[in-house]
Image (cartoon, grey):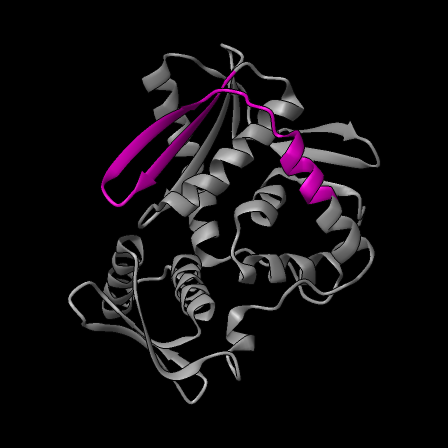
Amino acid sequence: MDRREIGASEIAIIIHGTTQQRWNLWQAKTGRSEDRPSQSAITGLLVEPALVSVAEKIIESKAVEMGKSYYRQEGEYVCRATSDAILEDGTTLECKYYQTYTDKHYQQHELQVQVQLYVCRAKMGRLLVLHGNSLDMYEIQPRDISGELETVFEWWSVHVEGDVPPPPPVAARIENHFVEGSVVVASQQLVFDVQQYRKFRDMKKTCENTMVAIREAVLEYMYKAQATCLVDGTGNVIAEIKNDRLYL
């Protein structure tokens, strides 16, 4: 394993991922755990070829390469990018499948595509997202990502090469960080996320990544406020910490 080779999706996790995602990445890259794809990631791999075909019809441009990895040296590190397809019009294509798609997901995927554009030297990238019954296409223009890459290389140097653990998931830091009985009002986005979490839980849908990300976002929000109770705008309790456990 080349510890100085960093993938586009890994760069996106370091910059925009949750504490849990960065923790999992560190464990995988330092050999402490296996880098196993989630069920949703496996599902995404199965539907990606079909999404590429759909994109070809929408864009009216054929895929000339699919799943090929490109590399670009940046100082001591090598950036790796593997887009789902390179189209004949010189653009990259990245396809994603989610039950629900949030702004947080888009932040990660926009940066992932930016890294692909940087490594492949492509003129534009497209992000095709199938979520629920909706299909959305985003056109992404290249931008300067040098500051983000610098942050990533510093994180990689300290935590992967230096073998220093990053901050653990908030769930591991609950004890002694919350004021019993304190209340904080959730943001509108967080209220929506909790509603989605409960919907997935009640329907027993397999959305592990999304549900973990929501729990992490709730804990981060409550952690910053040192609150044990999270309420919506009307005062209804939507999350609570009891006996060092989070209840949604």
Tally of marks: 0
Name the residue rendered at 46%, 66% in the picture: 224
Pick the residue in front: 203 or 157: 157
Please give left or right for residue 204 compared with residue 51 in the image.
left
Residue 39 position by quadrant? bottom left
Query: Which percent across, then down, holds residue 241?
Result: 38, 81
Name the residue rendered at 34%, 45% in the picture: 101
The single residue placed furthest to the left in the displayed view is 234
Please give left or right for residue 143 compared with residue 199 in the image.
right
Pick the residue in front: 221 or 54: 221
Query: Which percent across, then down, holds residue 213?
Result: 43, 59
**Residue 46 drawn in magenta:** no
**Residue 127 drawn in magenta:** yes
Please give left or right for residue 248 compared with residue 168 in the image.
left
Q: Is residue 150 above or below residue 86?
A: below
Name the residue rendered at 60%, 25% in the picture: 144
Query: Which percent across, then down, holds residue 207?
Result: 37, 59
Query: Which percent across, then down, holds residue 191?
Result: 26, 60
Q: Is residue 215 above or below residue 70?
A: below
Q: Is residue 56 above or below residue 20?
A: above
Residue 30 position by quadrant? bottom right
Q: Which residues are magenta?
A: 124-153
The single residue placed furthest to the bottom in the displayed view is 243
Q: Please identify the quadrant where the C terminus is shown.
A: bottom left
